[in-house]
Image (cartoon, rainbow, N blue to C red):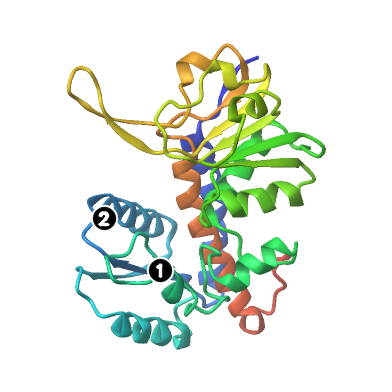
Amino acid sequence: MKRLINGKIIAEKFCETIKEKVEKLKNNGVTPCIALIKANDDPASEIYVSKKENLAKVLGIRSQTYKFLPGVKEDFLKNLIKDLNQDPTVHAILLQSPLAEGLSFKKLINLISPEKDVDGLTSINQGRLFAGESCVLPCTPQGVMHLIHSVKEDISGMHAVVLGRSVIVGRPMISMLLNNDCTVTALHSKSKNVLGICSTADIIVSAIGKPKFITQNFIKPGAIVIDVGINRIITPEGKKKVVGDVDLDDVWDFVEAITPVPNGVGPMTVAYLMSNTVNLAINQNRKKLGLTFDRF
């Protein structure tokens, strides 16, 4: 039976469990706190940061937002990150991408303490993920895995195709699927026979940023399709619209389950940002809480 994977509803249910954890933490004298750093004038980033602030408030998580316009000095941001690393009341730090021109995301992200790297993007956390070790997992791939498991709990041995190789989604996604015992194929802009390879996949995760690129010819009947793409287009009527990498209407008759855009992966990404914040707060206050991570 075909199924639309409603990320909004799944995220709301997941957030209920996060809120319960937050309440327990507060009752034990710990208020989870996330610091959000935005250094650009990108309107989309403003929206994303606002969504994170709003969800944090709903869940009882404290957020501290630092907004800077283009022209902010990299040294200033370095000092800010160092101060936040040393602040015991701040448990998670997020560096919102993209950064303004002239700022190095790689340099700044790697200044964040791995224990406060809420999106798992420091080289240390990515290396641990690659090695199959315990680490802070990136939020979007975690959300993707949650959505896949909402359809099928055991995915071991399944052929998963990941389109895209970014450090934020594609590369960690590949590692997480491997760690779930999938057979994984990575496809990117230089890959050949993309259509043919996709048509053999039991699971497709697309994060390439090409509107409605994936059509029914790419789909093996009964595949699970997770659309991470966020593409802003102008319709023939002249209206602005957000669409994914997958042409949902075209592939609908061939998939077992598929995420929509919007209300697919997006809500899960923000939910896991909050979940990671809470888990980091727990990890940094083990002695104070007198509880193990698993028991809390």
Circle 1 residues within 10 Å: few <14, some 14–19, many ≥20:
some
User: Going from the N terminus, do you reach mark 1 or mark 2 first?
Assistant: 2
The picture places residue 284, in percent across and down from the top left corner, at: 59, 79
* Residue 46: assigned label: 2
The picture places residue 223, in percent across and down from the top left corner, at: 66, 24
- Residue 112 visible in the shown view: yes
Direction from residue 39 to residue 192 in the image, left or right: right
Identify which residue, 292 or 171, lies in the foreground: 171
Vertical order, 260 against 275 (above or below): above
For badge 2, the amino acid type reads Glu
The picture places residue 148, in percent across and down from the top left corner, at: 64, 37
Direction from residue 140 to residue 69 in the image, left or right: left
Quarter of the image that includes the C terminus = bottom right
Vertical order, 126 against 58 (above or below): below
- Residue 135 visible in the shown view: no
Identify which residue, 140 or 158, lies in the foreground: 158
The picture places residue 269, in percent across and down from the top left corner, at: 49, 49
Quickly name the residue at label 1: 105
Looking at the rendered structure, the number of numbered marks drawn on it comes to 2
> Residue furthest toward the top?
253
Quarter of the image that includes the N terminus = top right
* Residue 290: assigned label: none
Which residue is painted at 67% across and 16% down in the image? 221
Instruction: Give the CA separation, mark 1 to mark 2.
Output: 17 Å
Which residue is painted at 39% across and 68% down in the image? 62
Direction from residue 94 to residue 143 in the image, left or right: right
Secondary structure state at the residue bearing disc 2 = helix
> Residue furthest toward the right?
157
Direction from residue 269 to residue 47 in the image, left or right: left
